[in-house]
């Protein structure tokens, strides 16, 4: 006996805005039934003592620690600015 009906397949296709034929509905019914059967086999596994994981690999953060460091001297920064005044970079006004 199939675990999913053709009507359920058509309903899901409708929700996904997919137009499927009767033949496609029957094909998807068989394929989805095979997927459900396989998933049910996983329920038979003994998972007692298996630690739940969020990822199959041991993933760790590879970024360096965010530590503040000494910046450039103000004089060196202002050398590259087209205009500066009172130790600040002068830019065109954007507010009217």
Image: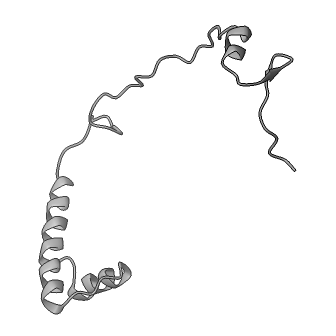
Q: Quadrant location of residue 86?
A: top right
Query: Residue 1: x percent and y percent?
Result: 12, 80
Q: Using the image, determine if residue 96 lies above or below residue 68.
A: below
Residue toward you, 44 or 22? 22
Q: Using the image, determine if residue 56 lies above or below residue 4.
A: above
Q: Using the image, determine if residue 24 lies above or below residue 49.
A: below
Q: For the image shown, how many numbered marks are present on the structure?
A: 0
Decide if residue 31 is in sight here.
yes
**Is residue 37 found left or right of 90 in the rendered image?**
left
Q: Residue at x 32, y 80 (%)?
A: 12
Residue toward you, 96 or 32? 96
Query: Residue 26: x percent and y percent?
Result: 13, 85
Q: Using the image, determine if residue 54 lies above or below residue 67.
A: below
Q: Residue at x 23, y 42 (%)?
A: 47
Q: Quadrant location of residue 80?
A: top right
**Is residue 9 found left or right of 28 in the rendered image?**
right
Query: Residue 75: x percent and y percent?
Result: 73, 9
**Is residue 1 found left or right of 16 in the rendered image?**
left
Residue toward you, 14 or 82? 82
Query: Residue 82: x percent and y percent?
Result: 71, 25
Q: Residue at x 80, y 45 (%)?
A: 94
Q: Residue at x 38, y 81 (%)?
A: 15
Seen from this angle, which residue lies furthest front?
A: 82
């Amino acid at each position: 006996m199939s675990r999913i009906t053709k009507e359920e397949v058509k309903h899901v296709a409708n929700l996904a805005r997919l137009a499927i034929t009767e033949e496609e509905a029957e094909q998807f019914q068989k394929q989805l039934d095979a997927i459900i059967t396989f998933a049910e086999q996983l329920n038979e596994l003994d998972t007692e003592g298996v630690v739940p994981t969020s990822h199959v690999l041991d993933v760790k953060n590879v970024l360096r620690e965010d530590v503040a460091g000494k910046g450039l001297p103000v004089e060196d920064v202002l050398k590259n600015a087209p205009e500066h005044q009172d130790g600040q970079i002068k830019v065109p006004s954007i507010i009217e």
